[in-house]
Image (cartoon, helix red, strand yellow):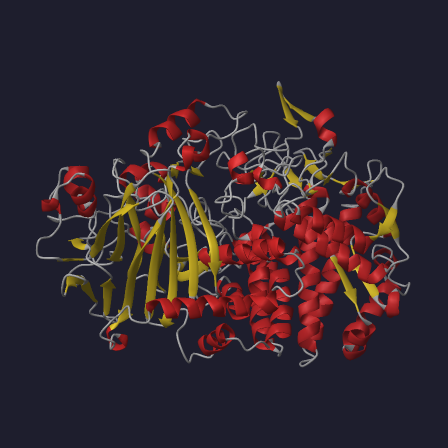
Amino acid sequence: MQHTPEHERLADADAGNAPWHLWGPYVSDRQWGTVREDYSADGNAWGYIPFEHAALRAYRWGEDGLAAICDQSQRLCLGLALWNGVDPILKERLYGLANEQGNHGEDVKELYYHLDATPTGSYLKFLYKYPQAKYPYRDLLETNQKRSRLEPEYELIDTGAFADDRYWDVQVEYAKASPRDVLMRITVHNRGPEQATLHVLPHLWFRNTWSWELEAIPPVIKAENDTTAAAVHHEWDDYRCHFDGSPALLFCDNDTNARTLFNSPCSAHPKDAIQSCVVRNNPAAVNPERTGTKMAGHYTLEVPAKSSATIRVRLRCFSEDKIADAFAEFDAIFATRQGEADAFFAPVQAHIPSEDGKRVHRQAIAGLVWTKQYFEYDVWRWIHGDASQPKPPDARKQGRNHDWEHLKNADVVSMPDKWEYPWYAAWDLAFHMVPFAEFDPEFAKSQLLLFLKDRYMHPNGQLPAYEWNFNDTNPPVHGIACWRVYNASARIQGYQDREFLERCFHKLMLNFTWWVNRKDANGRNVFQGGFLGLDNIGVFDRSRPLPTGGFINQADATGWMAMYSLNLMRIALELSLENCVYEDMAIKFFEHFLAIADAMTKMAGKNIGLWDDEDKFYYDELVLPDGDIVPLKVRSLVGLIPLFAVEVLEPELLAKVPQFANRMRYILEHRPDWASLVSRWFEPGRGERRLLSLLRGHRMKCLLKRLLDPEEFLSDYGIRSLSKYHDKHPYQFRVGNDVLTVDYQPAESTIPAFGGNSNWRGPIWLPMNFLIIQSLRRFHHYYGNDFRIEFPVGSGQTITILEAADEISRRVSRLFLRDADGRRAYNGECDTHQNDPNFRDHLQFYEYFDGDTGRGLGAAHQCGWTALVAMLL
């Protein structure tokens, strides 16, 4: 274990000795346009609270802000607002297009970066780029609406907003002097050629929790003097916020401006009063009594060309506010926390050879920390309404998520992207926890357990997918995440947390049973599952009734379940080392794995299986109402996922679980049909290891031949999600008079589906590449250096499976690392991003990447699963 000051803070927090996680970057980047804020009759979440209403309406379930932090229950928030003197609104939150406005769906239209973060939030660093000219809101909206799906998105950088360097780099940093003493430093850099004016407004506000309850007592923020405000809460700690210098303190209420929106009575100083005061020069808009539930310190800065200015703010609990001068040690505390952050990451990055690699790694980790978010959503209250508000429409009782009334979220959760995906996704989160476990294993464990709690997991065993439809089925990756986090925490913390593993196992068994009972239509161990997150990858929308009738036997769902069986078998074996009762469960999952392997080869006694022996690939199969089976011959990740079902059993482990070993031997001796399905079961591997896999040697070689072929899945930047074979050979399927086509699309999708911006028809996705790399390493662990494969296919050169895995890892890392010319592939042809010294080393972690060029696509801050690059570096 390491013993830096940050490691000690983590240990204190984990032991309950000091609440270092109390404050963090838990404020969403977007609360408007979310399902939980939607109280419309038609379920149009984007339309119920559009961006234009965000400054006017108090949210019900959470807050959004710019570079903002809050406490773990989001009672009190501290963030930033800006005004360049010409915009029509304060810059209080990030702007972006709603789903129906963008030519590829929803899209944030800002430039911001997560530059640094420690796991406790003891040091945080955020960069926002703000144009000095009028922000091009209308241009971004109208130009994108004119563009077709075949054209690229029109981004802020394309508008000329940063021409001649006429913009501000606004750097926001936080440092903690103690768990309840937070320092905020805002440094604005005028990158332009002339002196410019910037209004900077550090904001402090209470989340509105009082409007929804009868006779609730609101908290209050009130001025104590010209530079200090007190935030007083009747059920929580009281805080004092100090502003350095001589700002104007402006106060209002975090309440809806019902007068403007609905022509109804409301607070005399509603949520947008500070905006009215500053932008519309209306000082009467704010409360002259200098009290309310929202306030800001208004600084007007005149900054010379190529120069900077700094603002300092300190928020601390009354009990901590004992030093007369709040800013006496301010800079020294920041310097200490920055040094401690460097010390924390030094051992974590010890095996990363290049400085650029360390930069990519650190910003990937920073993105993971910055995309933590307080997420509250009580489905029962959302459906039935609040006592002090009008009742929601009756249709809600049979509408979206109506069968998840048990679900009550009020937690800090790891999000995929706090603007484009400011809601959790079950399988995204499982991937997030893999890199999290390397630097904050307790958080990783707590997040995985959170989704297994009874207020998250459905009573029937299903895990909630995401707020747009909790019933959607995500791939069952929770098991492998729990196993990886368990092992990582043992390595880092120095002990094996079997209590964590046991608690996971009990609930995962319920989830596994849900899969077996709900997603195996014929009870034959071949699974359906639905779209399973792989949007647009197949002929049909697999989550909807098929136009042909019938159902689809899915190679990916069945492969995932084979993997899940092996995950739970391995966890049960680990628990058996201290409690032999778990050997029975290990046997159960071993047998289930064999049954799935059998079903994938021959189903219902017919000589038809998910494996196509002619094409040497796994395909989905359409089962028609009359019983006919039609293979859907699309070469995609669907057919590669069976690679993930691989486990190597060490002889030392088998010696410690005799009941399991004896039963396993009996089954394989008396069921030769099953034994023949398990790769090389009776042949010893290196060191007498035994291999469990869906792929026998021949099938594995066939699949690897597709995987490692540049004309199929292998790209210069990783593994494509669809074979390039379909570029010249589109797959077509006729339904009546319609012909449905699947063709290779290396970049954005050309068809509107799954929200408009989703595309698995060619791009490179980090989570799938990560699992492919890990699976290949497991195969090598068994086969060793004597097993060689051609790489790349067609080259005539052979390498080991491990060398192939390492090369794929290097190719994926190449998306982010600067090449010999100093260019990062994900930046594409944008000269500013590639070469400008104020841009080129600030990284963005895109949702997916062009399968041919590596250009970043989709959400630009998918810091969750794209942060898996930290594991590959």
Residue 140, percent from left and from top: 39, 30
Residue in the picture at 21% in, 44% down: 275
Q: Quadrant of the N terminus?
A: bottom right
Picture quadrant of residue 412: bottom left
805 vs 275, nearest the viewer: 275
Among the 4 quarters of the image, the one containing residue 732:
top right
Residue 603 percent location from the top left of the image: 76, 45
282 lies above or below 449: above
Q: Position of residue 821 (x, y in %)?
A: 65, 41
Q: Report the number of numbered marks.
A: 0
Left or right relative to 734: residue 102: left
Closest to the observer: 310 or 590?
310
Q: Is residue 654 visible?
A: yes
- Residue extending furthest toward the top: 737
Q: Which residue is nearer to you in this view: 279 or 334?
A: 334
The answer to whether residue 130 is above or below residue 726 is below
Residue at 33% across, 65% down? 183
Is residue 525 visible to the viewer in this orientation of the structure?
no
Asked which quadrant contains residue 262, the reply is top left
Residue ID at (74%, 31%):
725
Measuring from the top left, give residue 12's x and y in whole percent: 46, 78
Task: Quarter of the image for the C terminus: give it.
Answer: bottom right
